[in-house]
Image: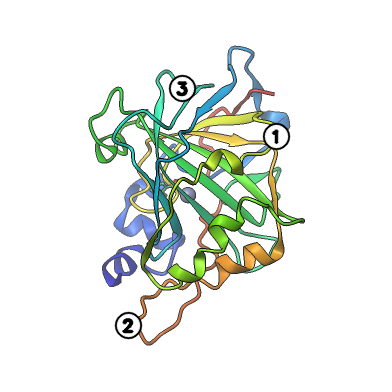
Amino acid sequence: SSHALRLWGSGPSVWHKNYPVAQGNRQSPIDIVPHQALHDPSLGPVVLNYDQCTSMNITNNGHSVVVQFDDSDDRSVIQGGPLDNPYRLKQFHFHWGEKGCHGSEHTVAGNSYASELHLVHWNAVKYKTFGEAATAPDGLAVLGIFLETGDDHRWLHVITDALYMVKFKVSTTVNCFNPKCLLPSSLHYWTYLGSLTTPPLHESVIWIVLREPIIVSEKQLGKFRMLLFTGEEEDQRIRMENNFRPPQPLKGRKVRSSI
Ligand SMILES: NS(=O)(=O)c1cc(F)ccc1F
Ligand SMILES: [Zn+2]
């Protein structure tokens, strides 16, 4: 929408003009340096209890493709790890580049992955709505999963085969998609306090980034790149790619590892 484009301007380097928190002390993403992460033995495993049928629709919202969930109860939650409460699954979405060598938001020792999946959850124990949680320091928990190119991912097809239906900024139904099928085999993670990576950049996210990437094919990734930022009615056809924010200053934060 032109409103968002005006506020978001020409990208991350100008966001601070409309969103001064962009230069805050807990901004995301960051570069994760494994050897500098603190192994914290008190960090338990992350537990994902996702119900089979809470997915609702897939939407091209003009800056990513988002699968929304019914978050009216605690059927699909993440808990454990660094979290004091269960956090309700609200949506998941992706960030990607125009080529395989860039696209993830977090980097690991300076290395980018081709894409990054974000599973967004909110603290429905302490806050009444997602909107309220999104402005609270412990309001959101986002599980980040890196995507690396290689063989076909058999379950990601459910999403990538639906993308042609949301080429423009529209929405279509997706029923009974359980994102548990998008997890890697190991749930070892890094965790730190950060923010949303797109405006309004609220500093409300407990980040849990999995160390092990999932493998998807170049063909599957290519289907993300044919999405458009623009709507069908607009004459320009701007391909949706490079929708990732670069790493932000750590500002003294500690990254802990479960590993
Ligand atoms: N990329 S993100 O997971 O930090 C994110 C999640 C939201 F729900 C809204 C905005 C965001 F930027
Ligand atoms: Zn994201």
The three-letter amino acid code for the residue at tag 2 is: Glu
The answer to whether residue 248 of the structure is visible from this angle is no
Residue closest to the eye, 2 or 16: 2
Q: Residue at x 34, y 83 (%)?
A: 234
* Other residues around mark 3 within 10 Å, as few (<14) / some (14–19) / many (≥20): some
Between marks 1 and 3 in the image, the one whose residue lies nearer the viewer = 1
- Lower sequence index among marks 1 and 3: 3
The answer to whether residue 124 of the structure is visible from this angle is yes
Dot 2 corresponds to which residue?
A: 233
The three-letter amino acid code for the residue at tag 3 is: Leu
From the viewer's perspective, is residue 75 above or below residue 198? above
The three-letter amino acid code for the residue at tag 1 is: Ser
Could you say whether the residue bearing mark 2 is in a helix, strand or loop?
loop
Where is residue 70 drawn, in percent x and y? 34, 41
* Other residues around mark 2 within 10 Å, as few (<14) / some (14–19) / many (≥20): few
From the viewer's perspective, is residue 43 above or below residue 206? above
Q: Residue at x 40, y 62 (%)?
A: 14
Residue closest to the eye, 136 or 227: 227
Pointers 1 and 2 in contact (C-beta within 8 Å): no
- Lower sequence index among marks 1 and 2: 1
Quarter of the picture holding the N terminus: bottom left
Dot 1 corresponds to which residue?
A: 185
* Other residues around mark 1 within 10 Å, as few (<14) / some (14–19) / many (≥20): few
Dot 3 corresponds to which residue?
A: 83
- Lower sequence index among marks 3 and 2: 3
